[in-house]
Amino acid sequence: MENNILTRSEQIQAGIACLLLVSVVLFSMDRFVLPTPAGRFVPADILSIMLVLFSAIVARNISENRQTIIIVAVFALLGLLGLINMGPLAVFNSLANPSRAVVDSMRYLLFAGTILFLVPVLSKKQIWAIYIKLFVISCIIVLIVSFGQILAISNVSPFNTLFMWEKIRGGGSRIAGTFRWQGPYVLYLALMLPILSTLTLTANNSIKRVKYSLLIVSCLIAIVYSGSRSGFLLLPFSLSPIFIIGYKRGDKFLTSTLAILIIGFLFLISLFDISAGQRILQRLFEAIADPTNESRFAIWSDAIYFMMNTSPLFGIGAQQTAETIGRSAHSSYVGITVERGLVGLLLLVILVGHLLRTTAQLLSAYFQGAPPIVVAIACMVPVLLVYFSFASGLNYRITPIIIALILSTREIHTRSPNNEKKKTS
């Protein structure tokens, strides 16, 4: 059996891990930035460094799981590749912005260390359970701020003065909750929906069921008012736990619950502002077929063509797409491929393959008796992978936390009895 008594170092690690989650979700805005010669630091960066240093020097416990090590290695190699590639690019004067290349590369190295040391912390069942509760609590805070912003952009006093933060992108018509811009905000909400859906279906009383259902509807409303196209594309994957759990239970009530949620969601949107939904559809169309040649597909085509004709093997340099092409890639897959070449693409294939394998393992564990919350964590993987197609989400600060949560869930719920005996012997 697992030892439920945490050592002092494990308690400190757990505290830093919880503060890291809170800082990423609630303290990422410009007002919390610490400018340094090395670049822009927020509390999450400092806490990640603290977690890595404390774990490496004092606790000295890392994940020994092969899949975790491979994923950590992918992030580390992405960082090292960005740094190593700077030399040749600088020699040939083709590195437009060296400082951005350094910051981006160091971020991937920090992500690798965060995942490496965070997974064994979250693999303790009691810490993992606290983390799930912390996700829900932080979501409630984010949604409170979000609805304040909805009232603010609707020019409702006094919310228009309290919640109109100028540095939020599109702050006059779009919301971003406690985040700097809509990208990580929508990803966070989409990652919360699988958890909230599962908690709704497994609630042991009607009060909890109503509470989690209201949180789901609130997340859907917030996604619409964010104006994010990606948010709509993520919804089928975010709400998929309802179908998976319903399939296993054979309960038709779950399907009707989903229909009620969707109808209620559409009704509330029309009640608040029907134009919010129209803006989403318009932006989605523009992303695919923009007449000014600014569609995502046009940007991807130009960026890949440029990379293949300049440096196909190692790419044009970390964070150099916007500097060289004049437009951001708006896709982790295209961005990594263009900036780190075919070698970077190979690393991405390895990462995606192991994340999909983890999803399969978690779903298999659920159908073999693991609790339903495992389904919620498994469904986070397709949410991440689909989001990476339309945004540069791989380098968001929330990404290593989610990946560590996914990997730790796999370690908790797919441990074989033989492995358990080895750990306790």
Image: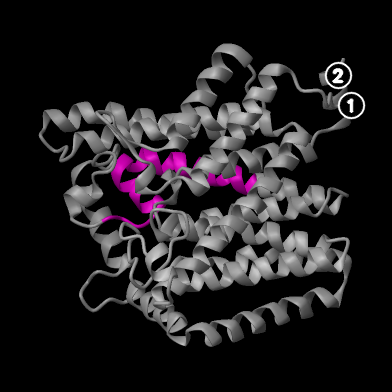
Pick out the residue farthest to the top. Answer: 57
Residue 246 shows up from this direction: yes
Pick out the residue farthest to the left. Answer: 93
Q: In which quadrant is the N terminus drawn? A: top right
Residue 323 on image: x %, y %: 18, 48
- Eyeballing the image, is 192 above or below 398? below
Q: Which residues are magenta?
A: 328-357
- State the residue in front, 62 or 357: 62
- What residue did someone put label 1 on? 1
Residue 65 on image: x %, y %: 67, 28
Is 247 left or right of 318, judged from the image as shown? right
Mark number, residue 424:
2
Residue 142 on image: x %, y %: 54, 57
Residue 190 on image: x %, y %: 57, 61
- Whether the residues at callouts 1 and 2 have beta carbons within 8 Å, the answer is yes
3D distance between C-alphas at marks 1 and 2:
7 Å
Is 372 left or right of 29, judged from the image as shown? right
